Amino acid sequence: MNKNIAYGVALLIALAAPFIGYPVFLMKLLCFGLFACAFNLLIGYTGLLSFGHAAFFGSAGYVTGHALTALGLPTEVGILLGVAASALVGLVMGALAIRRQGIYFSMITLALAQMVYFAALRAPFTHGEDGLQGVPRGKLFGLIDLSNDLTLYFVVLAIAVAGFALIVRTVHSPFGQVLKAIKENEPRAISLGYDVDKYKLVAFVLSASLAGLAGATKTLVLGFETLTDVHWAMSGLVILMTLVGGMGTLSGPIIGAFIIITLENKLGDIGTFLATHTGVEWFNTLGESVGMVTGLIFILCVLLFRRGIVGEIGAALAASGIRKKSV
């Protein structure tokens, strides 16, 4: 019940946010929040560490951008094609990667993701290093004009909420319980008769599809798609988001994504504000030190917050409840 109240409050805040903040930036936060949740479904609940999730995020963005610019397809069709492309890439990568475990699984996903990166670099429709520019937003179902930022925000919010709801339903379903069993003790899950490889593959494809949905939506929001989204650094970024927020928690990756993306986009403004009010000129250089700051946050999380922000808060609340009961 408490979780439902928290989700309701978060939804109300999200509905009011575009009237206070910049809608495009808020939409970017929602897209990366969904991306982090999709990744967390794989590592947090299945125990599979993928270093190649940028391949799904970026490939869906490219397919959606090409469908809307070159082919002139409706917006909803372009997004669906992007999701289908990421699901197909996920199926191929997953079928190859799940044959191995541990670091070998991770290295295979990284190698295959790099192949996707070089394909995006060379393919004619991606325009190489120039990327796809001027991707039109169009009209949703031919009726809703998405050129207005406020209108598009609520569409993106609906997509993000639907994706999050699907993840929550998956985690709490019998299928999700099997995934948790595989993460905790794979040999025992096998001994109980479960086809572990099949469950891993389905989880991998589902995670890839949701990551693709986030990537396709981001392309629609920003109006362009570049090689940055398929580069291995993007896979590292989503890992950082998940670890900072709390791996294996439902809302943790969203918090982590909001923190990391806000730092990347607003750190320069924060530095200027601090420099103005403290007189310390060094703060003006914070905008050029995003990597250093995010790296420092990662180190602090590893050393002090092993469960991530949400994980540590949850553990503290649980400990407090136990103490109250004992008293």
Image: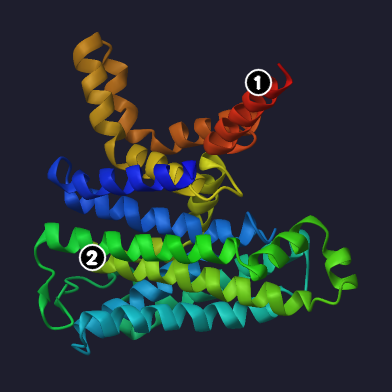
Dot in front, 1 or 2 = 1
Task: Find residue 77 and report its horizontal and vertical position in percent.
Answer: 28, 85
Which residue does the image show at 78% across and 71% down from the upper left? 100
Q: Is residue 195 left or right of residue 304?
A: right
Q: Which residue is mark 2?
A: 155
Which residue does the image show at 33% across and 34% down from the upper left? 288
Which residue does the image show at 25% across and 9% down from the upper left? 278
Q: Is the C-beta separation of discs 1 and 2 under 8 Å?
A: no
Q: Which residue is mark 1?
A: 324
Quick one: 131 or 86, which is closer to the camera? 86
Q: Is residue 57 above or below residue 265?
A: below
User: In the rendered image, which quarter contains the C terminus?
Assistant: top right
Badge 1 crowding class, 10 Å Cα cut-off, few under 14, some 14 to 19, many 20 or more, is few
Which residue does the image show at 21% across and 44% down from the upper left? 17
Tag count in the figure? Answer: 2
Q: Is residue 228 above or below residue 195?
A: above
Q: Is residue 29 left or right of residue 200?
A: left
Query: Could you say which quadrant of the image residue 64 lies in?
Result: bottom left
User: Which residue appears farthest toward the right when viewing the image?
Assistant: 191
Task: Find residue 231 and report its horizontal and vertical position in percent.
Answer: 46, 62
Q: Is residue 80 left or right of residue 98?
A: left
Distance from the alpha carbon under mark 1 to that under mark 2: 44 Å
